[in-house]
């Protein structure tokens, strides 16, 4: 089984730092990744992908990165099931396990 993503792009804004009730630090960053093809007008659109970064890596990202920073991220996709109206749904998140700052 394989569950991995690899992205490269610019941070859309400064990292948002949070802490869980148990004291674990996390950062939420939104990465803008350019699509590999042009739209009908000849423009390359960007996808905005929100990443979770945890613990020490979150502290590093929070102190080093800012909106506009070029980064690469590698990690896994996590699903969090919940039930609503008798049906099970999933929320998906991108959990970054490695982030490299390029600028």
Image: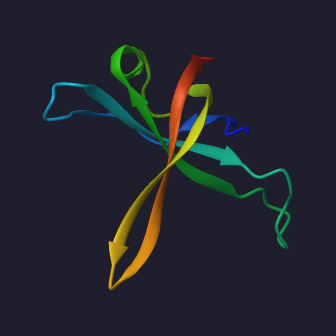
How many numbered circles does the render carry? 0
Q: Residue at x 49, y 43 (%)?
A: 12
Q: Quadrant of residue 65?
A: top left
| Closer to the camera in the image, 44 or 88 | 88
Q: Quadrant of residue 57?
A: top left
Q: Quadrant of residue 73?
A: top right
Establish if 66 lies above or below 38: above
Identify the image quadrant of the C terminus: top right
Identify the image quadrant of the N terminus: top right
Q: Residue at x 42, y 61 (%)?
A: 81
| Closer to the camera in the image, 81 or 69 | 81
Q: Is residue 98 left or right of residue 90?
A: right
Establish if 66 lies above or below 88: above
In the picture as drawn, the residue positioned furthest to the bottom comes out as 85
In the picture as drawn, the residue positioned furthest to the left comes out as 21
| Closer to the camera in the image, 50 or 77 | 77
Q: Residue at x 82, y 71 (%)?
A: 41
Q: Position of residue 39 (x, y in %)?
A: 82, 67
Q: Position of residue 97 (x, y in %)?
A: 53, 25
Q: Position of residue 23 (x, y in %)?
A: 16, 25
Q: Residue at x 47, y 64 (%)?
A: 90
Q: Specify whether residue 69 is in view.
A: no
Establish if 93 lies above or below 19: below
Q: Specify whether residue 89 is in view.
A: yes
| Closer to the camera in the image, 84 or 100 | 84
Q: Is residue 35 left or right of residue 21?
A: right
Q: Position of residue 47 (x, y in %)?
A: 63, 54
């Amino acid at each position: 089984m394989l569950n991995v993503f690899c992205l490269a792009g610019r941070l859309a804004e400064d990292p948002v730092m949070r802490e869980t009730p148990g004291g674990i630090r996390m950062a939420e960053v939104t990465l803008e990744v350019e699509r590999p093809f042009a739209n009908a007008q000849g423009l390359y659109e960007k996808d905005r992908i929100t990443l979770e970064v945890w613990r020490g890596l979150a502290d590093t990202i929070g102190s080093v990165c800012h909106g506009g920073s070029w980064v690469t991220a590698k990690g896994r996709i996590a699903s969090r099931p919940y039930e609503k109206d008798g049906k099970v749904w999933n929320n998906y998140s991108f959990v970054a396990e490695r982030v490299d700052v390029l600028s």
